């Protein structure tokens, strides 16, 4: 699957096809390796930077990483970003010598208008267990979690539970967890809670973000904005 093969209308139709394959279920095997994934690009550039960082689980020791600099022909269209991002992350996935049991994406799982955020899209296409850990809300309403670490509240969209707002640090905005493929919300929350360190962003996606931005800088294309990790 490559983004360039689709017009925007065809991409939406393909999302509906993928949604029919959605599998939000309890993961029934042990998790010993997890991966954090992040993608970076400028809206109107065809250059994509992508990285995956691997950790042993549950002790969270960094055990490897891979990255790519690639290009896309698919335009920047909110709700269809998977068509820019999934091919790039798939390139990184194919470079990994060790394949993680679960992939965590800096983005959405089913907390998406058509339930096809990048975590779900990647998971279905590549038959990988995935969930999203996003910094902002795409869709979903929720009550503000208590102002204490690891407090959370469910997120709903169109009367369906699509994720959770998780407070990782006191006095910080939540992050937004949503299952992607092959795992349920409870297990996704359980894993990500174990990945919370000293920062708002849990370690797998935080380290992937740092790596992908290091790659951008080395490529002479530093990110346009930074946020407090």
Image (cartoon, rainbow, N blue to C red):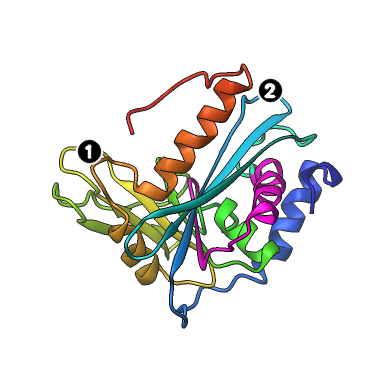
Q: Which residue is depicted at the point 55% across and 21% down? A: 217
* Cβ atoms under marks 1 and 2 closer than 8 Å: no
Is 90 included in the stretch rendered in magenta?
yes
Residue 44 - label: 2
Is 184 included in the stretch rendered in magenta?
no
Mark 1: secondary structure: loop
Q: Is residue 101 left or right of residue 146?
A: right
Quadrant occupied by the N terminus: bottom right
Mark 2: secondary structure: loop
Give the residue number, with chain letter if any, for mark 1: 172
Extreme-right residue of the structure:
5
Quadrant hosting residue 7: top right
**CA gap, disc 1 to disc 2?**
31 Å
User: Magenta span covers which residues?
Assistant: 82-107
Does residue 154 appear in this view? Answer: no
Does residue 3 appear in this view? Answer: yes
Q: Is residue 223 left or right of residue 58?
A: right
Quadrant occupied by the C terminus: top left
Q: Which residue is depicted at the point 51% across and 29% down? A: 213
Could you say which is closer to the camera, residue 158 or residue 37?
37
Q: Which residue is depicted at the point 81% across and 50% down? A: 10
Residue 224, horizontal then vertical, whole percent? 52, 18
Could you say which is closer to the camera, residue 124 or residue 126?
126
Residue 207, horizontal then vertical, whole percent? 42, 42
Residue 35, horizontal then vertical, whole percent? 49, 56
Q: Is residue 37 left or right of residue 87?
A: left
Residue 157, horizontal then vertical, whole percent? 44, 57
């Amino acid at each position: 699957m490559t983004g360039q093969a689709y017009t925007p209308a065809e991409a939406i139709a393909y999302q509906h096809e993928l949604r029919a394959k959605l599998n939000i279920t309890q993961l029934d095997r042990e998790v010993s390796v997890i991966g954090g994934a992040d993608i970076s690009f400028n809206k109107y550039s065809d250059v994509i930077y992508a990285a995956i960082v691997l950790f042993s689980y549950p002790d969270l020791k960094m055990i490897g990483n891979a990255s790519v600099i690639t290009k896309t022909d698919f335009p920047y269209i909110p709700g269809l970003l998977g068509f820019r991002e999934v091919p790039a992350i798939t390139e990184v996935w194919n470079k990994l010598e060790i394949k993680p049991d679960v992939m965590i994406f800096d983005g959405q799982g089913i907390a998406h208008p058509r339930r096809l955020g990048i975590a779900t899209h990647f998971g279905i296409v590549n038959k990988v267990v995935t969930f999203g850990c996003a910094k902002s809300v795409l869709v979903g309403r929720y009550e503000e979690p208590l102002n204490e670490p690891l407090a959370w509240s469910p997120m709903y969209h169109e009367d369906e539970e699509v994720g959770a707002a998780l407070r990782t640090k006191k006095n910080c905005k939540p992050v937004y967890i949503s299952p992607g493929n092959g795992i349920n919300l409870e297990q996704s929350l359980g894993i990500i809670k174990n990945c919370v360190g000293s920062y708002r962003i849990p370690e797998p996606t935080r380290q992937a973000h740092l790596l992908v931005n290091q790659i951008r800088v080395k490529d002479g294309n530093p990110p346009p904005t930074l946020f407090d990790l």
